[in-house]
Image (tube, rainbow, N blue to C red):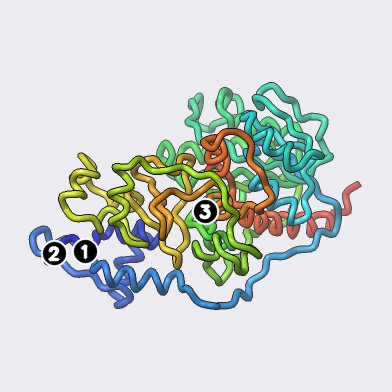
Amino acid sequence: MVMSDYLSLAEVSELVGKSKETLRRWDKEGILKAVREPVSNYRVYKKEDVKTLMGKLFPDDDSTDDISNFEEPKHNYSVLELFAGAGGLAIGLEKSGIKCVALNEIDKWACNTLRKNRPHWNVLEGDIKDYSFTEYNGKVDVVTGGFPCQAFSYAGKKLGLKDARGTLFYEFARAVKEVNPPICIGENVRGLLSHDKGKTLEGMISILDEIGYNVVPVEVLKAINYRVPQKRERLILVGVRKDIDIKYTYPKAHNKIYNLSDALKKGELFDSDVPESVGAKYPEGKKVVLDMVPPRGYWRDLPIDIQKEYMGGSFYLGGGKTGMARRIGWDEPCLTLTCSPAQKQTERCHPEETRPFTVREYARIQTFPDEWEFDGSMAQQYKQIGNAVPCNLGLEIGYSLVKFLNEYYNSSKPE
């Protein structure tokens, strides 16, 4: 058995985006059979079998999508967006028919991006701590915010708003309390589920409860299910005001999975090939290594001596490390984009050219429109795009909000 031809359970789990439990079930059902490594008796998989399966998971065909989350707004709806970044979520909500009345963001380059593209948007630049949002009380339908994940200090058994002081979630909750909208949405990385053994998320839920909001069961939405050609996941935290007896439902997952070709070439997602733009470059040493990696390949596809040299100490550690020396294939969704496209351990190399994706290619993978311009240096532009909520995911979330608000206004007829 030549081990370079095989992948571990952890590596396969990371590559195909399925849990280890699912892979064990697939083994029993014959969907993807594992074999036993003779020395350790660990479960391993033939690399060719995994590549065949990935082709089935992300088919490069003309499959149709009969799922639609579209909802026509029955009234004029508005949103206050916090931690707005470069506008990925705001663009999506705008397309769904929800008007941005104000956006707060501390990064000056992201603020410049917002103003450059939407001069009529009210961009509140600076630290959220310096702003009061009471003027929007009763005038805004949704408050959104991609607050960073920070640990709390626990003063008692039940975490209250005062215990969260000094964290950015406190500021998010304070804004929600000041505005008192029918619904609020926070978004974060999947890691929030396990942050501080789940206590951080529990604390957030108890704080929203304290300020008068029932939290909908938390879900992690996979961007590839919402017309985004990227394996990105976002945890969504939805609070519905306690006086409202209407259920919020998450957007339905689409049937069709889009790939890198859909992102960068003319097709269903975009009506032209990706525009040319500036882009980062790999150091010569890294380029020499990545030249050896085929599309869909990664460090395991390198000669063993190159693996050891390139990986250093990581070669002997556990885990799949499937993002290292990774070249994306045209016929698969891109791995989650990071804020720095050339850094080690998170390479996302172009399928044909040995280079990182350009700024406009980055933007396409995040489903930003080509006319959306990013301000600042090339590094600042990559950072803004890498931190963003994909616009198409924002659109689908927007439809779900419109559906909720239509029901709310039609049932309650508030003044």
Residue drawn at 72 percent across, 65 percent down: 70
Q: Which amino acid does label 3 sit on?
A: Val
Q: Which mark is residue 6?
A: 1
On residue 2, which mark appears?
Answer: 2
Query: Residue flagged by tag 2: what amino acid is it?
Result: Val
Q: Assess whether mark 2 and mark 1 are in contact (beta carbons under 8 angstroms).
A: yes
Between 371 and 133, the residue placed more toward the observer is 371
Q: Residue 221 carries which label?
A: none
Measured in 3D between alpha carbons, the distance from the residue under mark 3 to the one under mark 2, in whole angstroms, is 37 Å
Does residue 232 appear in the picture of this structure? yes
Q: Where is residue 8 in the image (x, y as percent from the top left)?
A: 24, 59
- In terms of image quadrants, where is residue 54? bottom left
Secondary structure at numbered mark 2:
loop
Q: In this view, does 239 lie to the left or right of 188?
A: right
Which sits in the foreground, 332 or 218? 332
How far across and how far down the image is residue 280, in percent?
Answer: 46, 42
Which amino acid is tagged 1?
A: Tyr
Mark 1: secondary structure: strand
Which quadrant of the figure contains the N terminus? Answer: bottom left
Instruction: Please give the residue where the numbered disc 3 appears in the rendered image.
Output: 220
> Real-space Cα distance between discs 1 and 2?
7 Å
Whether residue 210 is visible, yes or no, is: no
